[in-house]
């Protein structure tokens, strides 16, 4: 393993531990790691974006399509954001990007996320356990109707309608619960990924005892400070 | 002087939250260091459908791998990408990579090196595998790529796409030539459905962070033909292709971590209801 690779792994391990140190409390190491991460990510992102823009532009320019220079000029207008006098120029690239994004997205969203969703909801049949072949489809139908009714505010939810609305909120809560469970799974996966890196990557694991020692020193210093501040 | 005695529930509610962090760290670290081999259970239908779809594709079919995983989502999505790539390589499929976000670019390179042993210097690069690198502007970039495969003109390493064998026999030179686009990430797979599946008929698959999974179901199984849910889905796919890797190794920790959290949620709820039922002073 070369020196650069060793240093890279050590830096990754040190930044990982520094970021995890926030769980104890906010501290200088966490702040440094946080700012270093944001700075590095930003610098890397700018470099990749610029390289990619040039990769798109350069072949067209070499073909003599000089009007493509216009795209670079429009892109550079983003820098007007930093000028008080020329800030208005910044609005042009923003408008072009937002306008094209909306143009590309909206028309197809209507079909994909509205009309097609209606069709799918009405026609889909989920496999259900024996002996109830339509159980899941029935649950889907009840859930959709009741959850939609929960947001129907034109009529007061009284009498039997109150129960429809209540069933709707139960379905919504079940959906949120599933989303929460998935989020927990996602976060645990991140932790597992980092722990596997720390435990099994040479020489990252040498920093674990160092971090534990620093944590103990920090806790002891905290304990000593507390009686003075009390 | 009367000493105030607190109930166990009250003590639990006032407990320093850092003990919970420590408990989670121990519970997850133990199986990472010494796996206990908990069974994974049955393979989910979502993962199985994706596996079967890829498995039934004829050799040299094109699948597109869209790497949208941030470093934060990579722990879940990268094992799925690696398992899918391994499957595609073993079936002799053509794989086209691209990244709609800058910080996902290194993950494509890492997956290629892990599965193929090389990236641009692989002998089949340009024939079976092409990495387009970062394509800016998210959905607009995807729409451009889907409408014209030579939209970027060059790959991530500066090679001319038109000179590559990969693209020579494609009749349409757009997303109609693709057999599958697989989304890896935690943002949204909706744009694949909008820009690729609906207009060109190429189905979408996924190796998504678990947090995104509830947004996949509205399109499953018609437009999104199957997907891997987080680390668990990736572990299932690894087992299907008989190549246990990062995801399968992490599943013990995942299961025990969930178990610990479920126990804490149950204890917390019992404590909450117990403290609500307790009559206040003077009653």
Image: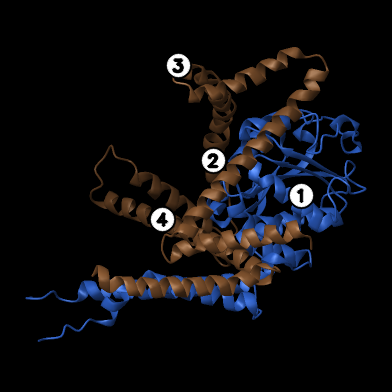
Q: CA distance from mark 2 to mark 1?
A: 36 Å
Residue under label 1, please give it. Answer: B109
Q: CA distance from mark 1 to mark 4?
A: 42 Å
Residue under label 2, please give it. Answer: A117
Label 2 packing within 10 angstroms: few (<14), some (14-19), many (20+):
some
The subunit carrying tag 3 is: A
Tell which of A98 and A124 is nearer to you: A98
Q: Is residue B133 above or below residue A68?
A: below
Q: Which residue lies at the image location 74% right of the left edge and 56% below the top edge?
A: A4
Q: Is residue B254 above or below residue A178?
A: below
Q: Is residue A178 shown left or right of residue B209?
A: left
Q: Disc 3 or disc 1, which is closer to the eye?
A: 3
Q: Which residue lies at the image location 61% right of the left edge and 23% below the top edge?
A: A75
Q: Position of residue A180 (x, y in %)?
A: 46, 59
Q: CA distance from mark 3 to mark 1?
A: 43 Å
Image marks 2 and 3: residues in contact by CB distance under 8 Å: no
Q: Position of residue A217 (x, y in %)?
A: 45, 73
Tell which of A169 and B271 is nearer to you: B271
Q: Which chain is blue?
A: B
User: Which coloring applies here?
Assistant: by chain
Q: Disc 1 or disc 4, which is closer to the eye?
A: 1
Q: Which mark is residue A85?
A: 3
Say if residue B230 shows up in the picture: yes
Residue under label 4, please give it. Answer: A171
Q: Secondary structure at mark 2?
A: helix
Q: Do discs 2 and 3 share a chain?
A: yes
Q: Which chain is brown?
A: A
On-image quarter of the C terminus of chain A: bottom left
Tell which of B67 and A89 is nearer to you: A89
């Amino acid at each position: 393993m070369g020196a650069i690779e060793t240093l890279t792994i050590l830096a990754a391990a040190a930044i990982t531990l520094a970021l995890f140190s926030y769980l104890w409390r906010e501290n200088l190491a966490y702040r440094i790691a946080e700012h270093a991460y944001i700075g590095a990510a930003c610098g890397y992102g700018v470099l990749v974006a610029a390289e990619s823009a040039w990769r798109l532009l350069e072949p067209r320019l070499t073909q003599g399509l000089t009007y493509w220079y216009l795209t670079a000029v429009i892109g550079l207008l983003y820098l007007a954001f930093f000028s008080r006098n020329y800030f208005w120029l910044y609005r042009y690239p923003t408008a072009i990007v937002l306008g094209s994004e909306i143009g590309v997205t909206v028309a197809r969203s209507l079909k994909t996320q509205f009309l097609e969703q209606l069709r799918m909801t009405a026609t889909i049949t989920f496999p259900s356990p024996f002996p109830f072949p339509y159980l899941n489809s029935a649950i889907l139908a009840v859930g959709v109707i009741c959850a939609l009714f929960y947001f129907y505010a034109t009529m007061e939810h009284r009498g039997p309608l109150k129960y429809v609305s209540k069933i709707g909120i139960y379905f919504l809560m079940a959906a949120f619960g599933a989303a929460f469970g998935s989020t927990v799974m996602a976060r645990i996966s991140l932790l597992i990924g980092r722990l596997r890196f720390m435990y099994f990557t040479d020489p990252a694991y040498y920093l674990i005892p160092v971090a534990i020692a620093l944590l103990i020193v920090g806790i002891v210093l905290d304990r000593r400070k507390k009686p003075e501040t009390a | 002087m009367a000493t105030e005695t607190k109930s166990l529930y009250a003590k639990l509610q006032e407990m320093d939250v850092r003990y919970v962090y420590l408990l989670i760290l121990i519970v997850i670290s133990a199986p990472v260091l010494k796996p206990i081999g908990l069974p994974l259970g049955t393979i989910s239908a979502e993962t199985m459908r994706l596996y079967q779809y890829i498995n039934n594709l004829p050799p040299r079919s094109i699948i597109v791998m869209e790497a949208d995983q941030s470093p934060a989502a990579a722990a879940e999505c990268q094992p799925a990408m690696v398992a899918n790539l391994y499957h595609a390589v073993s079936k002799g499929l053509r794989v086209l990579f691209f990244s709609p976000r800058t910080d996902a670019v290194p993950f494509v390179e890492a997956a290629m090196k892990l599965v193929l042993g090389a990236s641009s210097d692989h002998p089949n690069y340009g024939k079976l595998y092409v990495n387009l690198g970062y394509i800016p502007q998210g959905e607009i970039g995807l729409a451009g790529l889907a409408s014209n495969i030579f939209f970027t003109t060059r790959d991530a390493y500066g090679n001319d796409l038109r000179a590559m064998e990969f693209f020579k026999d494609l009749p349409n030179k757009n997303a109609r030539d693709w057999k599958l686009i697989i989304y890896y990430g935690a943002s949204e797979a909706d744009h694949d459905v909008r820009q690729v599946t609906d207009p060109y008929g190429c189905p979408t698959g996924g190796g998504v962070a678990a947090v995104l999974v509830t947004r996949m179901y509205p399109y499953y199984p018609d437009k999104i033909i199957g997907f891997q849910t987080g680390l668990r889905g990736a572990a299932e796919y690894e087992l299907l292709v008989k190549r246990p890797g990062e995801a399968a190794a992490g599943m013990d920790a995942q299961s025990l971590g969930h178990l610990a959290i479920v126990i804490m949620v149950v204890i917390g709820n019992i404590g909450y209801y117990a403290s609500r039922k307790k009559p206040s002073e003077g009653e």
